[in-house]
Amino acid sequence: MTMFEELFALACSATLTMTVSADEKSGRLTVNVIPKPKPDAGEPALAQPLSLTATPQEFDAGFIDALRGYREVRSSLAQQAEATMEVIEAAKAASVKKASDATTNAARAVAKPAPAKQVQATAPASTASAAVQAQDAADDDAQDAQAPAMAGAEAGGGGESYDLFG
């Protein structure tokens, strides 16, 4: 491939700006190839310039290979960027679907209330009833124990007293 064929292949994916400067003392050239990626390839790494400094003879011998290598790397970066964008878009779509499904399921759950549980009040009521009956029985026993003492006091007529605590 010639130099212009390589430049053409590189320019198919980006607009190129080239600067060439010479350092007369050292006898070297600096060539900058600065790509401006096309709008659909927004990857910043694709805008990285190629900057080479060499003698004119070295450029004659290796500039085409340097351009080819640069173009292939840029191509690989563009493919990687495109593949990454596809993965990101697929992940976004999956995330939107998952969120949509969760919202739909939540709306269904709110629209259909859960059945109410029946509470049985019979066990606590019977327990309370048994406690009241036990208390009544205890009160009756206490009254029965006091009845003979009261009866004796009434029957004896006057001044008899009984010491209940002594």
Image (spheres, rainbow, N blue to C red):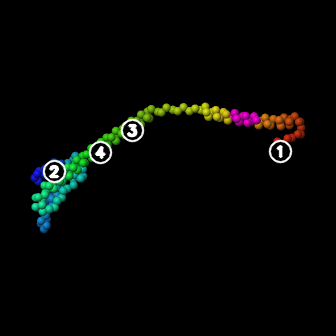
Residue displayed at 34% across by 41% down:
95
Q: Amino acid at mark 4?
A: Ile
Work out whether mark 2 precedes mark 1 in sequence or the reverse, and give the earlier one.
Answer: 2
Nearest to N terminus: mark 4 or mark 1: 4
Q: Are marks 4 and 3 in contact (CB under 8 Å)?
A: no
| Position of residue 142 measured from the top left corner of the image (x, y, whole percent) | 76, 37
What's the distance in space between the residues labelled 3 and 1, CA to CA? 81 Å
Sort mark 2 into few (<14), some (14-19) or many (20+) by Cα contacts within 10 Å: many
Q: Residue at x 10, y 61 (%)?
A: 57
Residues in magenta, as a range = 132-141
Picture layout, residue 32 above or below residue 139: below
Residue beneath label 2, please? 10
User: SS for tag 1?
Assistant: loop
Res. 164 image quadrant: top right
Task: Say which residue label 3 marks.
Answer: 102
Q: Mark 3 falls on what kind of element?
A: helix
What separation in Å lies between label 4 and label 1 (alpha carbons)?
Answer: 97 Å
Rendered location of residue 41, percent (x, y): 22, 48
Q: Return the disc, 4 or 3, that comes first in the chain's sequence.
A: 4
In the visual, does 153 lie left or right of 101?
A: right
Q: Kindly identify the amino acid type of the residue bearing the numbered disc 2.
A: Leu
Instruction: Identify the residue under disc 1.
Output: 166
Q: Are marks 2 and 1 in contact (CB under 8 Å)?
A: no
The amino acid type, in three-letter code, at marker 1 is: Gly
Tell me if I can see residue 110 in this picture: yes
Marks 2/1: CA–CA distance: 122 Å
Which residue, given by chain and number where applicable, does mark 4 sit on?
A: 88
Reply above or below: 153 against 66: above
Is residue 143 rendered to the left or right of residue 54? right
The Cα atoms of the two marked residues, 4 and 3, are separated by 21 Å
